[in-house]
Image (tube, coloured by chain):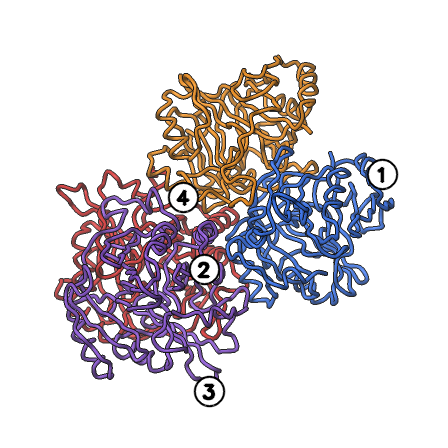
Chain colours: A red, B purple, C blue, D orange
């Protein structure tokens, strides 16, 4: 019951063919469908129709889709979101290729969030009958599935309240100005057992900082990094460890400039997880635990 | 809402001091409390009071405790379990050290299952304020937390029905005789996002096959295996890969003969996870994917 | 100066096409040449013409080739070997495809050892000009290079003396009956900085126990094990750790029954390396450090 | 025969007690001896008396010691070095604690190089009798042994010629201005089977860029990085991959400002290794393969 996971990320890219090389050949996603000006990608361990939608023209986030466990959840979330003061539309089957009815919500941060329960089932590449643990012939990084997104908002406290009160998310970690007089600068929120299904930090409304792919472990990050060098993918930062979430990471850019992440590790959360607090003076350690150094582009490059 | 996780495992051991060496020095759990004839252990990344209870005298499983998200869940689970035909008692605060009210259910498989919501909060060893990702001074294997248990039952189909109907668990993987005329031989069930929070296979009622600790990744399994050799811990099987759950594993025994596992990896499940089917002819591949060979003790040694 | 490394392994296989699948598709070696009844394979990080020669008909070792640093070394090794009492022939350029002049020595253990200095240079797959650290498109296990061979001999002490006195090898580790009255049961000898370039244990003369491929690390062994399962390669033992050499390992068989190994890790040796002694009572720990259990086939299956 | 390895690094540090925390508690070396104003450290897998000498007062390299295989090598290297035009002194037993007779050579780059054959034998921490593969109780990063040093020189071509002609080193990789009209900017030279035992790049004479510790693999680098954060060790760059040598790396500083490296991986070299060429336009990829970005301090911070 409730939101299960980040189901899809829809972004704009300047050139579909370059993007196809990046998301297909380098990251190893498969093309699920292609329409005029759009490519729909699916990673090998995902069973739903697609998880990344690329739309030609510009750069930046169009919308995020989160899948809910039951159709009835949509009614609950619609009411709560309206009461919270958000603009909520009903979206119909077919508004998104292969996706059923749902809600389109304009978040307090001006991002578009879609909630849906139905999407065409395709199945993973290894199948559900005596399956192998991974593909015999991996493509590039061979990302198994998408993981989370991090966006920016002018009012982190308001957005945290929205996700908590309307969608039952909980904060795994919170970044505050200081311990004694805390103002919220960022929040990493979960709806399942991962450290974050959505995260946001202080910044302009409506912007994407990055969306992330899950990798199995630290050894896969090294291979990913090698492939980024071979394929001329610009790397922003990493490989390194996050203090926040404990995950290991490489940040990099698609050819249009949207930031991606490959992410491995991180702890397990539950409804009773004791929220972790980071103070702003430890921010660089929280983000880049090993090097403890910030890079300007990491804060400024948003799409 | 509902069951969150395996909270504690309570087993009998023949000698508390030997067991202290195993669970403390080798696995690296800390002693949370000690009473006449019992030791309560907690792993470094667990925030509740304890997760393993050792009771001197004999060998084998006393009971499993699962923590629920809300107190009200207990009422629901009590009713459903009674309607299912199980014997259910209310347990009181103090029946278990540091644990609050709850339910004590005799499963169709004759195992004792305790459900509870309240347990004394202690906090992890790394804390919740600008925390490090792991302890500075690890002890032995440094297991972060317990993960799941696998028990045996004369009637896997009945036990699966109990966990599904009464506790809202779902099967991630099912082992059946064959694809055309399937009889259920085992089920790996989850209540959160892991491949299994409880699992059971065909066998005598009331027995424990193993309980497992989570490790971060495959590289930690190698260090664990090395420590088992240094500390003379009998290893049953591993390191290897599971076909079922995709996890990587070493099985080993505590000094009393209870089987433990260190487990890393495995996929992420959700309410819409497509249940995987394994057929009996592929069982050895399902359990020991790399070697595809069964070992007699693995099937016969139960406590 | 002296012997540099194991350069090639020449074995018989019952069926060349099956073997091609194993050494080519699964292990990922490339075909360097093919003649009537023979396939010559090269691994991606090897720069010489080939490292594995398969000859159709039967099973078992035909010969081992070790490359020496200088042509003059051949004269020295010829004299020493003759003085030691070995049968030594001169082999001519062309006796072995792409290999120059050299020596063909019948070892005291009845194995055929070839020493040579010249072999056609081909280059690695990543090249020698601003190279990438590994292939962009790995095939199967993607073994970088062969590493060592282990053979059996009726007289380990004699064979050790041969390799020490004639070829300047040194023992990194020695297996003896017991510490007080040691009889040599096995020796792991090196000519460079690895734990072993040749090894031998007590057993019938002229037989091969296994030859090994180097892998980068423990994480690559997991992927290798997964591929062995996917490709139905029989696994003998592993993944596990060796006590002897400290390496990590999987043993498996080619379709003809020749045992192969993938090996990662191990320490660095030098001319002043203090030889390690293992006693027979610790043999299983020496070979399979984690599980400390012997498997009959491991001792009996020789080709 | 010839030079075997980097045996010791002798550096100045501003404060011995701070340095003790770094080399002892964080890196995990053991104190082999302590004299007025000096600490001698040994890593757990080294069998000679010490490998790092710290001398209080200032910062920077005092000298490098390389161990030769035989006493007679010293005579050869003395003559060749003199003929090359270097100042060579004989050093006596006791000039260096626990070290025997040897040579003290002033290199064309103004660094002091000591060659010696005898040094007190201590043995590794795991011993040479039925040994475990690693310490049961690791301290900090638990570095097994030192690996190489990188220094700067005004004339890389001259220094390369010295190491090749006088000490029989060979270049594994060479950095040149461009392919058509190559001027040597740096050389990575080996005397055994590793990618480099000494390396040097264009820069002021007499300076140290870093000296390195070997680690087992990429997974150990992550733990090292975590410990650097916990112990407030300044990290210069990493974890990342080198294009040159293929190794994986973290660069960091001791409290006095001497740069250290933890290094894992890298290929195997032999006397016939085909020298790899890097051109200056690919330098950042050669050094930091994944991020392909240079950091000013990396070039400028020398001691």
Q: CA distance from mark 4 to mark 3?
A: 50 Å
Left or right? Give the position of D98 relative to C38: left
Residues marked 2 and 3 touching at CB (< 8 Å) = no
Closer to the camera: disc 1 or disc 3? 1
The residue under the point 77% across, 35% down is C70
* Residue to which mark 1 is pinned: C83
Dot label at residue B181: 3
Residue sitting nearer the eye, C141 or C247: C247
Label 2 vs label 1, nearer the camera:
1
Query: Circle 3 marks a residue in which chain?
Result: B
**For the residues bearing labels 1 and 3, Cβ distance under 8 angstroms:** no
- Gap between marks 4 and 1, in whole Å? 53 Å
Percent from the top left, x then y, of residue D154? 55, 20
Residue D67 point in image, percent of width and height: 60, 26
Give neighbour class at mark 3: few <14, some 14-19, many 20+ (Cα, 10 Å).
few
Residue located beneath label 2 in the image = B250
Q: Secondary structure at mark 3?
A: loop
Q: Is residue D253 above or below residue D13?
A: below
Residues marked 1 and 3, same chain: no
Mark 4: few, some, or many residues within 10 Å (few <14, many ≥20)? some
Q: Nearer the viewer, residue B297 or A130?
A: B297
The span from disc 2 to disc 3 (Cα, nearest Å) is 33 Å
Specify few, some or many for label 2: CA neighbours under 10 Å numbering under 14, 14-19, or 20 or more. Answer: many
**Where does residue C178 sit, x and y in percent of width and height?**
61, 47
Does residue A8 appear in the picture of this structure? yes
Drawn side of residue C286 relative to residue C85, left or right: left
Q: CA distance from mark 2 to mark 1?
A: 52 Å
**Local SS, label 4:** helix
Q: Which residue is mark 4?
A: D223
């Amino acid at each position: 019951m409730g939101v299960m996971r980040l189901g899809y990320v829809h972004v704009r890219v300047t050139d579909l063919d370059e993007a196809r090389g990046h998301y297909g050949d380098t990251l190893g996603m498969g093309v699920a469908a292609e329409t005029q000006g759009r490519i729909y990608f699916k990673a090998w361990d995902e069973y739903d129709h697609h998880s990344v939608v690329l739309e030609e023209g510009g750069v930046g986030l169009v919308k995020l889709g989160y899948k809910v466990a039951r159709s009835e959840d949509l009614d609950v979330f619609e009411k709560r979101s309206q009461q919270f003061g958000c603009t909520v539309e009903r979206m119909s089957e077919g508004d998104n290729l292969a996706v059923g009815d749902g809600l389109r919500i304009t978040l307090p941060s001006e991002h578009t969030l879609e909630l849906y329960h139905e999407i065409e089932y395709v199945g993973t590449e290894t199948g559900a009958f005596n399956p192998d643990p991974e593909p015999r012939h991996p493509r590039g990084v061979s990302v198994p599935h998408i993981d989370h997104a991090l966006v920016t908002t002018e009012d982190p406290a308001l957005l945290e309240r929205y996700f908590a009160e309307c969608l039952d998310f909980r904060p795994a970690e919170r970044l505050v100005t200081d311990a004694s007089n805390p103002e919220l600068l960022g929040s990493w929120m979960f709806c399942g057992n991962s450290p974050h299904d959505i995260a946001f930090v202080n910044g302009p409304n409506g912007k994407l900082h990055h969306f992330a792919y899950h990798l199995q472990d630290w050894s896969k990050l090294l291979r990913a990094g090698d492939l980024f060098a071979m394929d001329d993918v610009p790397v922003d930062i990493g490989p390194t460890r996050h203090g926040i979430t404990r995950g290991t990471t490489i940040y990099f850019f698609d050819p249009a400039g949207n930031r991606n992440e490959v992410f491995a590790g991180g702890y397990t959360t539950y409804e009773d997880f004791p929220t972790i607090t980071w103070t702003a003076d430890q921010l660089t350690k929280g983000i880049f635990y090993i090097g403890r150094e910030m890079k300007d582009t990491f804060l400024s490059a948003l799409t």
